Image (cartoon, rainbow, N blue to C red):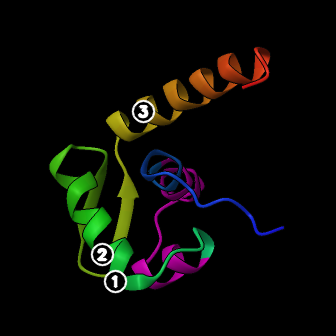
Amino acid sequence: MPKPRRSRVEITADVLAVLEKGCTNPTRLAAEANLAYDRLAKLLEALKSRGLVELSPGEVCISRRGLEFLAEYRRWRSFLESFGL
């Protein structure tokens, strides 16, 4: 049985979880987040516009707001799992 597709929120959380370990270059981030590079590039622009990541030439870092988002996402996932959802 194939693994279900990730939602946009799950993909965002996966990207931020990789960045939580430290800043990295986009190519490595795409590989670690299991995401095609072209999709990652579009997502990073959206995350930057929302203040969740900081982009500099050749490097991507998570912002304070990104860390807050990730913490809330994990709390939300834990809440849902407590109900078996």
Q: In the picture, residue 25 is in which quadrant?
A: bottom left
Q: Which residue is identified by label 2?
A: 41
- SS under mark 3: helix
- Is 3 displayed left or right of 53 in the figure? right
- SS under mark 2: helix
Dominant secondary structure, magenta: helix
Quadrant position of the N terminus in the picture: bottom right
Q: Which residue is identified by label 1?
A: 38
Viewer-nearest residue: 21 or 3: 3
Q: CB of mark 2 within 8 Å of CB of mark 1?
A: yes
Measured along the vertical axis of the image, is residue 30 above or below residue 7? Answer: below
Q: Which residue is identified by label 3?
A: 69
Measured along the vertical axis of the image, is residue 11 above or below residue 41? Answer: above
- Distance between the Cα atoms at labels 3 and 1? 23 Å
Q: Position of residue 14 (x, y in %)?
A: 56, 54
- SS under mark 1: helix
Look at label 1 and name its amino acid. Answer: Asp
Query: Which sits earlier in the primary sequence, circle 2 or circle 3?
Result: 2
Q: In the picture, residue 26 is in which quadrant?
A: bottom left
Residue 23 belongs to magenta span: yes
Crowding near the residue tagged with mark 1, few <14, some 14–19, many ≥20 C-alpha atoms within 10 Å: few
- Residue drawn at x 31%, y 52% is 53
Quadrant position of the C terminus in the picture: top right
- Is 30 displayed left or right of 77 in the figure? left
Residue 69 belongs to magenta span: no
Look at label 2 and name its amino acid. Answer: Ala
Magenta residues span 13-31
Q: CB of mark 2 within 8 Å of CB of mark 3?
A: no
Look at label 3 and name its amino acid. Answer: Phe
